[in-house]
Image: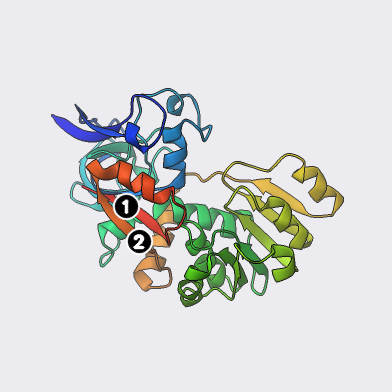
């Protein structure tokens, strides 16, 4: 039995991605096998494809299959699995930061890295959710423990992680400031953003101040974010860790800075699913592509102008 999957034989641009046939994986004890119906596309996917991201040995030497966000139907269960049965609709971010091979028709992974897809939530929305929503949740709730009336600054607020971080911070009662292009400001306001900064025309230091928690999803706004933090405030640097020298600068100023990397968490994903089903959390899907058009999805994402997530459909 074989399946289609996207693979690459070398690092490079989107053109290195291509479809191949591969054996369907078998679940071992505690694992489930998911027949994938949709797979989310994330910036980390494009970085790994290009030869970067520094996620470990199994993602540095092709051939490999990128992707971590999956939604689909359980079609086999390993011994010991009690949370899911064949036919259940599930979604998850398995194995991160190890290779998950989500751009494929089947994926196997530990059952506790998945959650049930709520009734009324479609597979495309579910596939768009795990990596971005878990990143936002683990930063806002677990790392920063954002509290009511705190001022939170989210850079790249219109991106996959950013638009969810805005909403999760709002559910905690925070006052949320976000940077994004002017074209995204109205949509972000509809999601609850209190103040929008046009990163193309405004300086952060002049546009805001007294920030309790800053989330830099851009790799370039660490120093500017530190400058607007209150004493004791926290800066979370997400894509590539803390820039050189920023930790020392933060200590001198009586502020805090940390790096961050998301982890699989089926329990948190279950809570996130509940928020989506209730209408408290909106996951924006910017567009969908067929599996074989993964290269086109990567090209679109690398333009840096999408609002929300791109998703591959199978």
Do the residues bearing badges 2 and 1 touch, measured as CB atoms within 8 Å?
yes
Q: Is residue 158 visible?
A: yes
301 is higher (above) or lower (below) than 185? above
Q: Position of residue 174 (x, y in %)?
A: 61, 72
Decide if residue 241 is on the left or right side of residue 8. right
Residue found farthest to the right: 252
Q: Which image quarter: residue 13? A: top left
Decide if residue 298 is on the left or right side of residue 141. left
197 is higher (above) or lower (below) than 106? below
The foreground one among 84 and 95 is 95
Of the numbered discs 2 and 1, the one sitting upstream in the chain is 2
Provide the residue designation for mark 1.
311
The foreground one among 56 and 9 is 9
The residue shown at (64%, 64%) is 153
Give the crowd class for mark 2: few <14, some 14-19, many >=20 residues within 10 Å. Answer: some
Q: Secondary structure at mark 1?
A: strand
The residue shown at (26%, 44%) is 293
Give the CA distance from mark 2 to mark 1: 7 Å
Provide the residue designation for mark 2.
285
Q: Position of residue 42 (x, y in %)?
A: 42, 47
Residue found farthest to the front: 201
Decide if residue 268 is on the left or right side of residue 311. right
Q: Is residue 69 visible?
A: no
């Amino acid at each position: 039995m074989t399946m289609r999957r996207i693979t690459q034989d070398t690092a490079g641009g989107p053109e290195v991605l291509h479809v191949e046939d591969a054996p369907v994986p078998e679940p071992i004890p505690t694992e489930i096998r998911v027949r994938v119906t949709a797979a989310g596309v994330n910036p980390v996917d494009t970085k790994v494809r290009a030869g970067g991201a520094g996620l470990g040995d199994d993602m540095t030497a092709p051939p490999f299959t990128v992707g971590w966000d999956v939604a689909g139907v359980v079609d086999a269960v390993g011994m010991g699995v009690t949370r899911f049965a064949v036919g259940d609709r599930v979604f998850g971010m398995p194995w991160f930061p190890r290779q998950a091979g989500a751009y494929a028709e089947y994926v196997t992974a530990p059952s506790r890295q998945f959650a049930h897809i709520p009734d009324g939530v479609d597979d495309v929305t579910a596939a768009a959710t795990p990596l971005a929503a878990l990143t936002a949740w683990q930063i806002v709730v677990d790392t920063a423990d954002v509290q009511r009336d705190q001022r939170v600054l989210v850079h790249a607020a219109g991106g996959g992680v950013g638009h969810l971080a805005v909403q999760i911070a709002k559910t905690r009662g925070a006052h949320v400031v976000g940077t994004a292009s002017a074209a995204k400001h109205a949509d972000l306001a509809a999601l609850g953003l209190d103040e929008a900064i046009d990163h193309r025309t405004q300086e952060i230091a002049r546009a805001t101040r007294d920030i309790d928690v800053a989330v830099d999803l851009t790799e370039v706004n660490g120093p500017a974010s530190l400058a607007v933090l209150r004493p004791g405030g926290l800066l979370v640097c997400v894509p590539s860790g803390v820039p050189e020298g920023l930790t020392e600068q933060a200590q001198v100023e009586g502020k805090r800075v940390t790096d961050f990397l998301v982890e699989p968490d089926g329990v948190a994903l279950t809570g996130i699913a509940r928020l989506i089903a209730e209408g408290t959390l909106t996951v924006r899907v910017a567009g969908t592509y067929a599996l074989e058009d993964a290269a086109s999805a990567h090209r679109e994402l690398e333009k840096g102008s999408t609002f929300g997530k791109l998703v591959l459909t199978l």
